Amino acid sequence: MTLDEIRRAINSDPANSDWAKRGVGPLFVADPAARIVIIGQAPGQRAQASGIPWDDASGAKLMTWLGVTEAQFRDPELFAILPMDFYYPGKGASGDLPPRKDFAPRWHPLILGQLPRIRLTLLVGKYAQDQYLIGRAKRNLTENVRAFREYLPEVFPVVHPSPLNFRWQARNPWFEADLVPALRASVADAIV
């Protein structure tokens, strides 16, 4: 299947019919030339409405961590963006609902199979790390992120850049001091 065929299949899947009826397509970015794939949670309300992944304060923070401009971040020949679910999951009691558990295992392998030049996989947050660090994960997200060097050079786990994670960042000053410079270096190496 080509990327266009995969996108059409996702859009026509009965599990996604509520979104398709409203004219909402799957939100992901993939190009065979991409060098880095960012695997995050799911589009937020704002991203779903705009059709632009990471179109919020979290996206701005992520670009800062990566050390790239918005033009670079939005270049599909540099960055593929594959959330764990390609549709906004709705609001829950304490934030957005989690992505559907069966979504990424079904669609990610098809898409990733079309991205032969990926040099770095960025795992943003718990859901991506739970899926992609099977058998290699630590006890929790903080330990996964702290052990980022163990996953290099192919994989780089990070915490979600949500403004709501300011307390986590305050408790873990090593993140900005040690991880962010290493992340920028990995990104720079991957996009050359």
Image: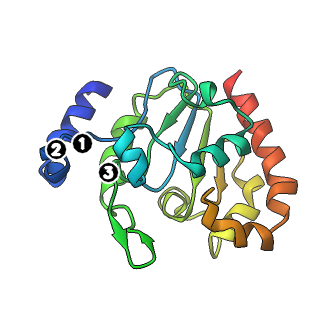
Q: Residue at x 43, y 30 (%)?
A: 30
The residue beneath circle 2 is: 20
Verify CB contact (< 8 Å) between mark 1 and mark 3: yes
Q: Quadrant of residue 27?
A: top left
Amino acid bearing label 1: Val
The relative height of residue 77 versus residue 8 in the rendered view (above or below) is above
For the residue labelled by badge 1, is the local secondary structure a helix, a strand or a loop? loop
Quarter of the image where the C terminus is located: top right
**137 vs 143, nearest the viewer:** 143
Distance, label 2 to label 3, CA atoms, is: 10 Å
Position of residue 59 measured from the top left corner of the image (x, y, whole percent): 58, 45
State whether residue 155 appears in this view.
no
Position of residue 191 measured from the top left corner of the image (x, y, whole percent): 67, 25
Drawn side of residue 39 relative to residue 149, left or right: left
The residue beneath circle 3 is: 87
Q: Quadrant of residue 42?
A: bottom left
Closer to the chain start, of discs 1 and 3, is 1
The residue beneath circle 1 is: 24
Closer to the chain start, of discs 2 and 3, is 2
The relative height of residue 76 versus residue 61 in the rendered view (above or below) is above
